[in-house]
Amino acid sequence: MSIQIITDSGSDILDSGRPDLTVLPLTISFDGEEFQDGVTLSHQGFYEKLVESEALPVTSQVSPYAFETAIRQARSRGDEVLIITLSSKLSGTWQSACIAAGEFDSGVSVVDSESVTVGQHALVEYALRLKDSGASLDTITDILNREKKQIHVLGLLDTLEYLKKGGRISKTAALAGGLLSIKPVVTVRDGEVVLLGKARGSRQGNNFLIQQIQESGVDFTRPFFLGYTGLSDALLKKYIGDSRAVWEGHTDQLQTGTVGGAIGTHVGPGAIAVAFFAARS
């Protein structure tokens, strides 16, 4: 029996090229106009709209019906189903998946990634590797629930404007931060996005990220990803150049991609993100 893996577009997986992976889109609304994340609205199109919009867009969870439909299609082929969602503390998508899974007696497992974007992507990729190795649905589920705690997600923001728009910081704090060129560094902790520190300027921000990664260590035998928000990857390229010592000698290729609306709505363009499994002690 094969395993079909289902995730949501909060993972920012756009085209895996794998028929055993289904990505269900979140809904993104700009001024009442709805789009399917990564389907009817590309990441580039999202940021074009974001920078032109006065108000923040609204993101909506994947519905139970969408999950149930995808599960039913897989089960009709005789496949078992593993669902990996973005953090239940950031979206109701996990709850939707659980409701849908409850319609089936067996063969369906749901994992809360407790992460989002590149971190969720890393967990999905890890699940695919475990499946390819011949692991069973129950074994994969147990491993993911145990080892997802080892995923580190770090992000460096370029602007405080979108945190201000979302009401997460005051206008005064945003203005002061802008004048001082403050670059917040965030992480995902217990499924929530939290402030890890602040840096003065991009160079200090890059150095802060590098320091955090070196303290944890990277398990290069497991998936790791880098991402960026906005229309240009220039800041990510600069970070990769600055952090060359972290990666050299460990990998021939860094996998990079764009961060979509699930996180991009709240951090705005110009952010960079890194996700990796911490080195085993």
Image: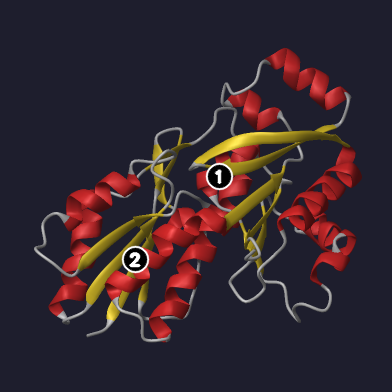
**Residue shown at the point (17%, 82%) measured from the top left:** 77
What x and y, as percent, mark residue 267? 64, 39
Q: Nearer the viewer, residue 241 or 164?
A: 241
Mark-to-mark CA distance, 1 and 2 = 25 Å
Q: Is residue 24 left or right of residue 44?
A: left
Nearer-the-camera pick, 247 or 217: 217
> Which residue is disc 1 drawn over?
263
Q: Examine the image and state in which quarter residue 7 appears.
A: bottom left
Q: Is residue 181 above or below residue 95?
A: above
- Which circle, 1 or 2, is nearer the viewer? 2
> Which quadrant would the N terminus be assigned to in this image?
bottom left
Q: Is residue 75 left or right of residue 62?
A: left
- Amino acid type assigned to the residue bearing label 2 in the image: Thr
Asked if disc 1 and disc 2 are in contact, CB closer than 8 Å, the reply is no
Any part of residue 255 in sight? yes
- Counting every numbered tag in the picture gives 2
Residue 51 image point, x, y percent: 65, 39
Q: Of marks 1 and 2, which one's residue comes earlier in the chain?
A: 2
Given the current orientation, which residue lies at the most extreme front position?
Answer: 281
Q: Secondary structure at mark 1?
A: helix
Residue 167 x %, y %: 57, 21
Q: Which quadrant of the view contains residue 259?
A: bottom right
Q: Is residue 59 above or below residue 102?
A: above
Report the quarter where the C terminus lies. bottom right
Q: Is residue 40 visible?
A: no
SS label for mark 2: helix
Q: Residue at x 66, y 33 (%)?
A: 195
Q: Residue at left 64%, top 23%?
A: 164
What amino acid is at disc 1? Ile
Q: Residue at x 78, y 19 (%)?
A: 175
Residue 141, which numbered label? 2
* Mark 1 closeness class: few <14, some 14–19, many ≥20 residues within 10 Å: some
